[in-house]
Image (tube, rainbow, N blue to C red):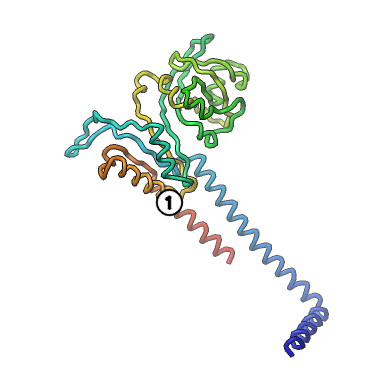
Amino acid sequence: MLDRIAASSLRVGFDTLRSNPLRTLLSTLGIIMGVAALVSVLSLGDGMERFARDQISQTTDLQTVTLAPSLFRTVDGQRFPRTDVVSLTREDADAVASVVGEAGITTMVLSGQALVSTRADTTPHIAQVVGTLANVAADLPAKIAAGRFFTDDEVRRDAAVVVVSAPLAAQVAKGRAAASLVGDTVLFQGQPRQVIGVLASVGDSRTVLAFMPIGAAKSALAPALVGRPTTIAVKARAVEDVPVIRDRVGAWLANRYGPAWSDRVSVTTNQARVDQARQGMLLFKIFMGALTG
């Protein structure tokens, strides 16, 4: 009985469609256009969100959680230099990476300035030296145009190698192509470093950078900066992961240094700006959802 009713309903429906071809065509077009509009708006929203996240990741430090030794002790509102400054080691970085897990990428950073020259041209140029680990290769300010980045093995050996930015290569190469600098020896504070990579030029950027294995960077900094403490930096994979990483790092530090760990190691984030970015992402999703609806 039900089968006969369903078959009769289908016949009536098809007869109606055949008897009103224009209305059928317009209805079909309306459905197609509605679905296409829905898919387009959702795709546009996803693309804009990915672009915004990429820009936040590449051009800001909103996703970075930094661990740095405290250099001063505060007593009754007065700051006094510490004599027991914590020294963060590679083992500490490995422990933090284990605690953070897949939520972020952990590395070590030692930065400062150095005078750069060559044996053929002793004219000094100033550069920002960044000592770090090999895992930052995917997060450089520009792609590698020539050569390569240093490896984990070179970091363990404190190899005397360096990857330079395009502006630094242009200063040192003196009219030669930047790529031709690969294989040459450049002096940082008089210490030789073999150039193994040159970064690509990015717009009109004039940032003069040199990346080295963290151990090799210590002897390549200006003498006044050699004693600068090493920091551990964790870059979250998404803005939403920053509070999670901070909590995990805080728990690890409490286990390592006790309840008063914040007096020994400072953990810094741009929490206010992180919250703004998260709110912006949420408002954008709500807006796109309303527009789609």
State the residue in front, 97 or 241. Answer: 97
Q: Amino acid at mark 1?
A: Gln
Q: Quadrant of residue 110?
A: top left
> Residue 174, image x and y in percent?
57, 15
Drawn side of residue 156 relative to residue 32, left or right: left
Q: Residue at x 52, y 10 (%)?
A: 121
State the residue in front, 190 or 280. Answer: 190
Q: Total label count?
A: 1
Instruction: Name above or below for residue 108 compared with residue 286.
Output: above
> Residue 132, image x and y in percent?
46, 30
Q: Is residue 209 visible?
A: no
Q: Residue at x 32, y 34 (%)?
A: 69
Q: Quadrant of residue 31?
A: bottom right
Give the class, few, some or many, for how many residues have Cα within 10 Å of label 1's Cα (few <14, many ≥20): few
Residue on which disc 1 sits: 276
Which residue in the rendered view is the most extreme toward the top? 120
Q: Residue at x 59, y 30 (%)?
A: 144
Give the structural element (helix, strand or loop) at label 1.
Answer: helix
Drawn side of residue 25 relative to residue 172, left or right: right
Q: Residue at x 83, y 79 (%)?
A: 18
Q: Quadrant of residue 259?
A: top left
> Residue 181, image x and y in percent?
59, 19
Drawn side of residue 21 relative to residue 68, left or right: right
Q: Is residue 183 visible?
A: yes
Which residue in the rendered view is the most extreme toward the bottom? 1
Instruction: Name above or below for residue 179 compared with residue 88.
Output: above
